Amino acid sequence: MSDSFGNDAPADAWGTNEPQDTPQPSGSAPVVFDKEALAQRAREQGWTETTAYDYEAFEREIGEIGPEVPELEAILFGREFRPEQGEHIAQLKEIEVHVEGPERIAPIVRFTDAGLHPAVLANCQRAGYVVPTPIQGYAIPTILGGSDVVAIAQTGSGKTAAYLVPILSKLMGKAKKLSAPRPDVTKPGFDIRSHGVRAEPLVIVVVPTRELAIQIFDEARRMCYRSMLRPCVAYGGLPMQICREELGKGCDILIATPGRLCDLMDKPDLLSMNRVKFTVIDEADEMLDQDWETELTKIMAGGDTNEDADHQFMMFSATFPKGARELARKFMAEDHFNIRVGRAGQTHKNIRQNIVYVDQNAKREAVYDLLISMEKPGRTLIFCNSKAAVDLLDDFLYNRQLPTTSIHADRNQREREDALRAFRTGKAPILIATGVSARGWDVKNVVHVINYDLPSAMYGGISEYVHRIGRTGRIGHQGLATSFYNDRDEDLGQALVNILVECECEVPEFLSHLTPEDGNIQFDDDSDDEAEAGDGGAWGGAADGDGDAPAAAGWGSAEPAAPADDGFTADAGFTPAGGAPPADDGW
Ligand SMILES: Nc1ncnc2c1ncn2[C@@H]1O[C@H](COP(=O)(O)OP(=O)(O)OP(=O)(O)O)[C@@H](O)[C@H]1O
């Protein structure tokens, strides 16, 4: 799909082209509609006029924003970083969106409909975003409206921008008003030890791994362009001295791993939480799996000093276990929104999943054969369950002259960064990793994910499988996921078959006995537990037969929100942002 600002833009994705109200059936003369007669007929039948969308225009003052700096712009938004949405983006929109909250959300179908600050809108354009993904369509207006949000959506569906864009839009133009004083680092004689300040961020984003922290920091830098806000990153493994120096220059948006953030919270001379207005927990499920619950509870409580009544909390993930729901219930406003694109833990049809039977002792040869026979070699990510297995496989393939590198928790920071850089740049296009270390990675053009070891329950089970294969087939691109299965993986068999059936992938012969005869898949996902617990069903309301809890009082809508692809017309009186979606914007 072409850039929305080029002349060959997809019609109206940014609302800049004339709406096409005259359909042109191919090969025949244009059909001319008499709009007035049609309007009259519609009114006679009792249809009201299309009402304008409430938050179409940006209503507050632009405020003070920074100048354009072409050199910086080229660095931040250079081709290397442009995601270039794939042509199969429509697959993502086919998934039903479920929303529970105190009121209906009118999802946005164009970025221009969201009432975003013009400078943020321009940054979205520069970043190459064409149309909002479904999770962005719902989360952006909800966050702009000031609500707390729990959001679940498939891997690679743009969750990071779903929170960064509205948060930055709310802060853009207000840096001078809201930010803590910052030292002038350009002043001659500036010395961080004597002139450094205490960091008082407005936004905290918590993520499970260092690599993810750096990736989100990069995305935040792009969205902060011209905002005069300063993003910083802090993670375990970064020398405390460097952390101190960075924070000492001032920090408005802090992206951090939970352990390091809690360390910093214990050092009031370095960090104060008193200005925090937005707390985002990204990949919440992973952090709870990794036993960061105490740290998350401390972070969500916001430290002793934060008394901001408007403090917004957000949790984003592709899966949503019980622990995360409990955290949400404890810290979020009672009227928070739950936005779920599809089933929690669902994947999508852009990933072709292959399960092949391979005996444990034949795996090495099998992975070699697979790599050597790839039609067109491309970036490939291989997952093993243990660090030792990663090292062994890396040695084995490297000795067979394949361009490999590897990453796991025992590597030092430098080694991890080098490995990821080599993979990103294509110097070492085969990366072998443990699942945890690759959580949330967004690497362009990963064409193949191989589960050398499938993640048994001990290694995160089926949700880990979903996260792993989600490193390919991102944002409308297609990808392949091959998994080696043998008797040791039987505990995962049923869940795998369910996902294969759901995504219309082939179920291999050796698992075919697990295919439900009546075609009805029973997902053993976390949302069911909730319903069984009888506590009101955090996911209540989606009466769609997918196993969700029945409608619960207090969660507003009793039907699923409209599927994102049908013009959002599920409900009378429910008008999509900006009217009907553009005719040909791919959604
Ligand atoms: N509207 C959009 N149009 C085009 N590209 C987009 C859009 N929104 C986000 N992207 C790009 O899509 C890629 C994937 O986004 P992101 O990493 O936020 O996905 P995610 O849902 O968080 O995935 P995961 O669950 O695997 O962490 C990024 O490169 C991002 O810049």
Image: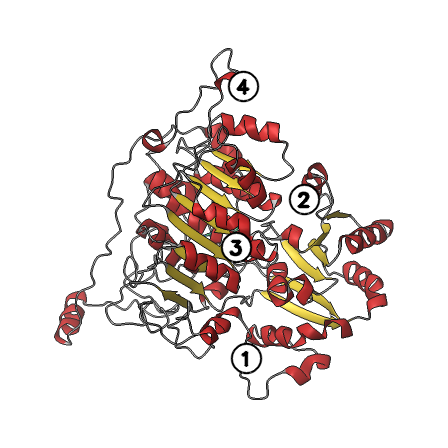
The dot on residue 420 is 2
Which residue carries the number 3 mark? 284
Which sits in the foreground, 150 or 565?
150
Which residue carries the number 4 mark? 193
Which residue carries the number 1 mark? 522
Pointer 1 and pointer 2: residues touching (CB < 8 Å)? no
Picture coordinates of residue 17 (x, y %)? 32, 51
Which sits in the foreground, 459 or 224?
459
In the displayed orientation, state which residue is furthest to the bottom.
Answer: 518
Which sits in the foreground, 100 or 214?
100
> Which residue is found at the position 54% from the left and 19% from the top?
193
Badge 4 or badge 2: first in the primary sequence: 4
Picture coordinates of residue 467 (x, y %)? 60, 60
Given this view, does label 2 or label 3 mark the residue nearer the observer?
3
Give SS at disc 2: helix
Given this view, does label 1 or label 3 mark the residue nearer the observer?
3
Cα–Cα gap, marks 1 and 4: 60 Å
Q: Is residue 343 above or below residue 337?
A: below
- Which amino acid is tagged 3? Ala
> Which residue is found at the position 33% from the left and 73% from the top?
558
